[in-house]
Amino acid sequence: MKIRAFAFVWTFLIAFYLLNPVPHVRAESAALREGIRQYNQENYEEAIEALIKAREVEPASSPAAFFLGLAYKQAQDYPKALENLRDAVTLTPKIKEALVELIDVLYQLGGPENLKEAEKWIGVGEREGIYPAKTAFLKGLVLQKEGRYDEAIEAFKKAETLDESIAQSAEFQIGICFIKARKLKMARKSLETALLRDPQSDLASYARQYKDLVENRLFLERPLRFTLGLFGGYDDNLVLKPSDSSLAPGVTNEEAYFLNNSLRVNYVPKLNNPWLFNAQYAGSWKVHSNNTHTHDFVANSVAITPGYNFGRWSLNLVGGYNHFLVRNPSYKKYLEAFNAGPLLRFLVRKNHLLEVYGGFHWNYYNRKPLIPEENRDSAGADTYINWIWVFKKGAFLNMRYAFIDDNTEGDNWQHRGHKLSASATIPLIRKFNLQVTASIFRQNFKNTHTIFLKRRKDNTYEGSIGLTYEIFKNANIVAQYSRIRDDSNIGIYDYKKNIYTLGIEYRF
């Protein structure tokens, strides 16, 4: 914010030099008069040139220092403005109007030393009663830049009580302080007050933009967050029929339409300390037009993630439980899965987040296998490294490497796997977003298969492309195409499938 010298000051000084010359007027008075004239016509370069001459002839002239400081300030040459405005408040006669300009220049320059000096001059202004409202407002700005938000708010409140004309600016700055202090509800209230004071002003438009940002942040940071999904689609290989149809000649009706309903609930309380906490419940119910007694399912999962924030990095403990019911012909328990482990998050640099996780998983299947070697009950290690880059508003790139060591009860399913994946969300025109994902999962099985008599190796490739459109606030239509290709050296596990999905997702 820039604070200009008051118009009556300029008028007084101009009148003093133009209408009341003293007997010992010298050549520098003409330079000063020319500099003031050029300044008032907003010819700042010409004003600087004339006022430099005025100061050269009479270095002790506080009016020349004042107007040269103002001209440099308008030209945004703050270091030179600072030098001359210092002179204007220390030479005789002191120009008290220069004080608020000097404080403002120190605020614009920033840095610990300049802000400390600004506080010194603010103290002078308060003691001498120099433009109390302006001085209080500048005090608020300086304290805000120093991160002393509560004190800054008090200063802004004092400024608006002293001068109604700056009340809107003061309320706006109070709102900014609350934003920086992460008191978003109070920030919204102050910005609303700033809007109501003069809805047609330029400042009101800025207040409106900040208010929208605050409301979006309040929505994103609400403790309870719900997401509902309703999707329909088509799967051309629901039963994973092998690519070589001669290996499964009796398999038919592999295609199916489906309906998938989902609910996700997140609980993220706002804690006023370094402790972190996140809990999530997710549920889904999927039904199919074919193979309903083997593939319809109900899934429920719960995850709890407490943690501690150390500043640029945080340590979290992840714990999760998943429960699946599969229709056969009624719904019966199919799988229970647990996972737990520590998660480190590092803020590598602005907009770059790195995650490192190392944990364990346990899977328990409720159906008895045909032979012991096909028992898929397991325990093993899960680790991953994840990098997230938010490269512009609403756009991000996510890349992950994961390692899985799955020690199953049955020899045929023991394996180690390496998975590379990437996903990106990119805003397009208006309310459209493009979503792209791709992954490759290489699985090397540890034992010779007891039926096919060779060690199984699978490379699973997955990719999807989707388009989302916001039909109204927090509600999106989602269209997606996905393809999966499992390239296995054992033909019965080699398959490909295509999935087409269309639905709506609503967050509240």
Image (cartoon, helix red, strand yellow):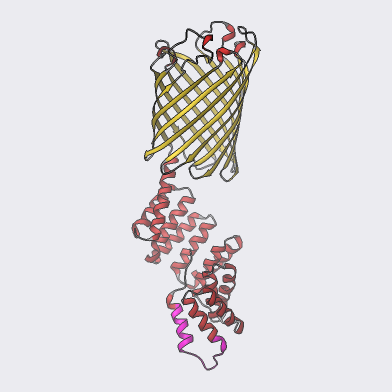
Could you say which is closer to the camera, residue 255 or residue 387? 255
Q: Residue furthest top?
A: 371
Quarter in which the C terminus is drawn: top left
| Quarter-of-image position of residue 308 | top right
Name the spot of residue 500 as percent of width and height, x first: 43, 26
For the image shown, how many numbered marks are present on the structure? 0
Name the spot of residue 106 as percent of width and height, x first: 56, 65
In the image, is 263 to the left or to the right of 411? left
Q: Which residues are magenta?
A: 9-29
Name the spot of residue 255 as percent of width and height, x first: 43, 17
Residue 221: tell me if it is visible. Answer: no
In the image, is 245 to the left or to the right of 471? right
Name the spot of residue 428 as percent of width and height, x first: 45, 42
Q: Is residue 21 shown in magenta?
A: yes
Residue 164: tell me if it is visible. Answer: yes
Residue at 43 percent across and 62 percent down: it is: 158
Relative to 381, does residue 172 appear above or below in the rendering?
A: below
Residue at 57 percent across and 70 percent down: it is: 82
Q: Please, what is the dominant secondary structure of the magenta stretch?
A: helix
Q: Residue furthest bottom?
A: 23
Relative to 172, does residue 480 appear above or below in the rendering?
A: above
Residue at 41 percent across and 26 percent down: it is: 262
Could you say which is closer to the camera, residue 25 or residue 256? 256
Residue at 53 percent across and 81 percent down: it is: 93
Q: Is residue 96 shown in magenta?
A: no
Could you say which is closer to the camera, residue 135 or residue 341? 341
Relative to 352, does residue 495 appear above or below in the rendering?
A: above
In the image, is 164 to the left or to the right of 373? left
